[in-house]
Image (cartoon, rainbow, N blue to C red):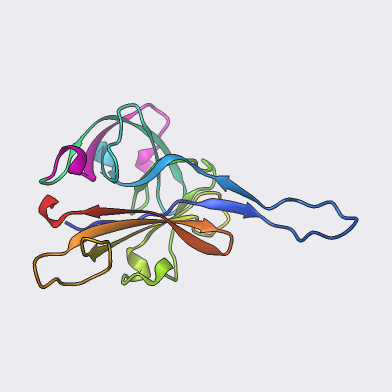
Amino acid sequence: MRVAVLVVACAFTRVDARPGKVVRVERRTQRFSGEPRLCSVVPDQLVAYCYGKLPEPGTRLSVMDQTHVLGGLVVEKAEPLGQCSGKQSLLWTAHLRNDGGSDLGSADTGVAGLLDVTVDSRHAKLVKVDEVPGDRPVPPEQISAFDLDGDGKADLEFIGFTCDDSGNPVSVLNNGAPDQCMEVWAATGHTYERVRTDRISHNCY
């Protein structure tokens, strides 16, 4: 099983201060209300495979493809995916309910969802990136990146890679199989900052 990747966004408004001019203060807008999480969605089955903490029943999942927002789905229940359970689990199968506001039939290839993230329902979508934040050893094609406001730029990126028990990227280990790490990166002006790293033990998958 491979782990996917995600990033959350924060936007800045920036203007240089000049004497005698009206100044807009640089401000960071937080677009996530809790712990931003990525879910891979299977639209025709109303199922999603999510990373991070447990998706609580009643949580709304914003679903989008590479062209637009498909709508929102509601988590009915979630169960551990893989061999780990309880607090050890960071992989979940979420069973969803369509409350009538999601047009899943118009989905393009590659459907993903976000939990605890505010998106522009008219303009948000999945996007491709050319660079990998943090010099992580993965190609850009394997990054799940989201444009949350329709400006054509990735605001939130999820990066998955094999890692050691400290979260450092590795390909192999001398004393066993590597774990899987999922990092969340958010746009902060012209750069990205790491929001969180979830490490999934190799014993869980």
Q: Residue at x 14, y 71 (%)?
A: 173
Q: Quadrant of residue 152?
A: bottom right
Q: Residue at x 44, y 71 (%)?
A: 131
Front residue of 167/117: it is 167
Front residue of 188/41: it is 188
Q: Is 99 contained in the magenta span?
A: yes
Q: Residue at x 25, y 61 (%)?
A: 166
Q: Is residue 104 above or below residue 196?
A: above
Q: Quadrant of the N terminus?
A: bottom left
Q: Residue at x 47, y 48 (%)?
A: 68
Q: Is 24 contained in the magenta span?
A: no
Front residue of 79/202: it is 202
Q: Quadrant of residue 55?
A: top left
Tell me residue 164's x, y (percent): 21, 64
Q: Which span of residues is magenta-colored?
A: 84-105
Q: Is residue 170 above or below residue 88?
A: below
Name the side, left or right, on which 126 lies relative to 93: right
Tell me residue 193's x, y (percent): 47, 59
Q: Quadrant of residue 46?
A: top left
Name the side, left or right, on which 59 lies relative to 162: right
